[in-house]
């Protein structure tokens, strides 16, 4: 994907109203924000607009109000108060993102308005699934009506500003009112600095990697990462597969995998990928030993086994020889992208593979290479291991970074102006 999108630096901000979509989808429990990484991540763009004389209208979604309802843990007021303290500046909070005309009209240069959770309006996402018993025609009509409402919301959000800035990489894979549709109704749409950083790291890794380029994929399901494996096979020197998804590959190679995770409908795909790797001359590394458990439990009995898992046992982590094999490949890399844990790292007995790989990935930056952690569980593992500062880039977007690695165009990025 082209990364040459205009950013805040490419436009005149003085006196202008900037509507900025940020990713303030922070974890909240009982009204307390437990991790402010995403708020901190947006600060460079926020400060830049204010320092350059702009008026800033911030908007984001938080949580899943469409599923869990509107409640005191998904109001953006929490973030408005938090951010206000963080930057030592008043923030005007508007309790309906579609009803902010008066507050926006009253803004002076350097002011901040923050809108309530965009997902309090169902048309932000315009999710639409066919209901049981609903005819195709009715479903089509309902979908079209929702899309029309989405445009109205997008147009309303656009009306607040002269410039749209998208700094929410985490939702850039969604074509929502505030992430993509809005760009049709506002004169200029640019990337924020966090978005720019994400695109730079992920984009250059995938399009123009310094070699050797090693990708590490793990996690529970092969089906979640089908397109990533396919796309990366054409780009990497080495593809490392661990975690639950490795067992479908091992079974496809003829191993007995006991009760390990397996997606039987993906066996042919796994065979195809093994053949494709050979054809392309890509080194495909799979486990050579495993930590097998007699049950899925932190107190399970365990044993180290090869690639044939005994009947009644399940592979829950890669074994010590595999850690060594993977670490050696990783340490020699100049570009590493990692998405998905090597085992059930949430349980202490099965965290050595993930932490071992984490230690190897941490050496890449120290050796002058680039290490990119692609969101989701790998980020929690890296944070848990205390090695976060030793990585070149930790992506703020799990789903978005996966879609990027699949080679897909992200609607929230595609809609921004080219340089
Ligand atoms: P994903 O969301 O696909 O990245 O999967 C992450 C989850 O995969 C984590 O919660 C891990 O505990 C789980 N996982 C990793 N390895 C295994 C395994 N061998 N068996 C079962 N679950 C696993």
Image (cartoon, rainbow, N blue to C red):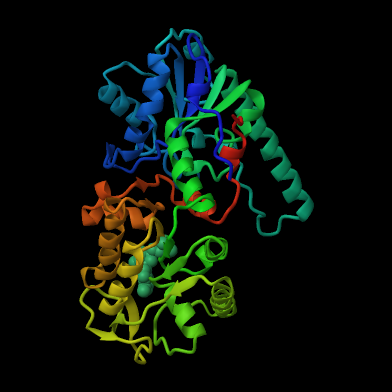
- Give the vertical position of 41 relative to 262 (above or below): above
Q: Residue 302 sits in which quadrant?
A: bottom left
Q: Residue at x 40, y 36 (%)?
A: 24
Q: Position of residue 8 (x, y in %)?
A: 49, 24
Ligand 1 appears in which quadrant?
bottom left
Residue 48: x and y, percent?
40, 21
Is 296 or 234 nearer to us in this picture?
234
Specify whether residue 171 is in view: yes
Q: Is residue 324 above or below residue 102?
A: below
> To which quarter of the image does residue 112 belong?
top left
Q: Quadrant of the N terminus?
A: top right
The number of discs equals: 0
Decide if residue 171 is on the left or right side of residue 276: left
Q: Is residue 343 visible?
A: no
Q: Residue at x 63, y 48 (%)?
A: 128
Quadrant location of the C terminus? top right
294 to the left or right of 197: left
Lateral position of residue 119 relative to residue 312, left or right: right
Q: Is residue 166 above or below residue 219?
A: above
State which quadrant residue 416 falls in: top right
The residue at the point 55 percent across, 28 percent down is 6
List x then y, in percent, for residue 288. Answer: 35, 82
Residue 360: x and y in percent read: 28, 62
Which residue appears farthest toward the right when viewing the image? 137
Q: Residue at point 34% right, 91% down?
A: 310
């Amino acid at each position: 994907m082209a990364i040459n999108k205009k950013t805040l630096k490419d436009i005149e901000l003085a006196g202008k109203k900037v509507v900025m979509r940020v990713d303030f989808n922070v974890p909240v429990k009982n009204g307390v924000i437990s991790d402010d990484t995403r708020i901190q991540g947006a600060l460079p763009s926020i400060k830049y607009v204010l320092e350059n004389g702009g008026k800033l209208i911030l908007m984001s979604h938080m949580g899943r109000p469409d599923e869990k309802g509107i409640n005191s843990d998904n109001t953006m007021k929490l973030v408005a108060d938090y951010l206000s303290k963080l930057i030592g500046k008043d923030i005007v909070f508007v309790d309906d993102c579609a009803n902010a005309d008066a507050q926006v009209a009253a803004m002076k240069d350097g002011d901040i308005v923050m809108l309530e959770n965009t997902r309090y309006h169902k048309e932000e996402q315009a999710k639409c699934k066919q209901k049981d018993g609903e005819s195709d025609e009715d479903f089509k009509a309902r979908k079209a009506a929702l899309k029309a409402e989405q445009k109205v919301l997008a147009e309303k959000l656009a009306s607040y500003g002269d410039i749209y800035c998208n700094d929410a990489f985490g939702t850039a894979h969604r074509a929502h009112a505030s992430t993509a549709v809005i760009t049709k109704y506002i004169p200029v749409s640019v990337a924020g600095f966090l978005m720019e950083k994400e695109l730079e790291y992920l984009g250059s890794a995938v399009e123009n990697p310094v070699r050797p380029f090693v990708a590490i994929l793990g996690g529970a399901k092969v089906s979640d990462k089908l397109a990533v494996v396919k796309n990366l096979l054409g780009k990497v020197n080495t593809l490392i597969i661990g975690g639950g998804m490795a067992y479908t590959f091992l079974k496809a190679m003829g191993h007995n995998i006991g009760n390990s995770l397996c997606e039987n409908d993906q066996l042919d795909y796994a065979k195809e990928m093994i053949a494709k790797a050979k054809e392309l001359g890509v080194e495909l590394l799979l486990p050579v030993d495993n930590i097998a458990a007699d049950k899925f439990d932190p107190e399970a009995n365990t044993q180290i086994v090869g690639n044939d898992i005994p009947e009644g046992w399940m592979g829950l982590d890669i074994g010590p020889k595999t850690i060594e094999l993977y670490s050696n490949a990783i340490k020699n890399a100049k570009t590493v992208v990692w998405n998905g844990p090597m085992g059930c790292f949430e349980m202490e007995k099965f965290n050595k593979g993930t932490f071992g790989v984490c230690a190897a990935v941490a050496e890449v930056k120290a050796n002058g290479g680039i290490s990119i952690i692609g969101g989701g569980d790998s980020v929690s593992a890296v944070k848990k291991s205390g090695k976060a500062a030793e990585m070149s880039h930790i992506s703020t977007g799990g789903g978005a970074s996966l879609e990027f690695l699949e080679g897909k165009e992200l609607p929230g990025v595609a809609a921004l102006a080219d340089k």
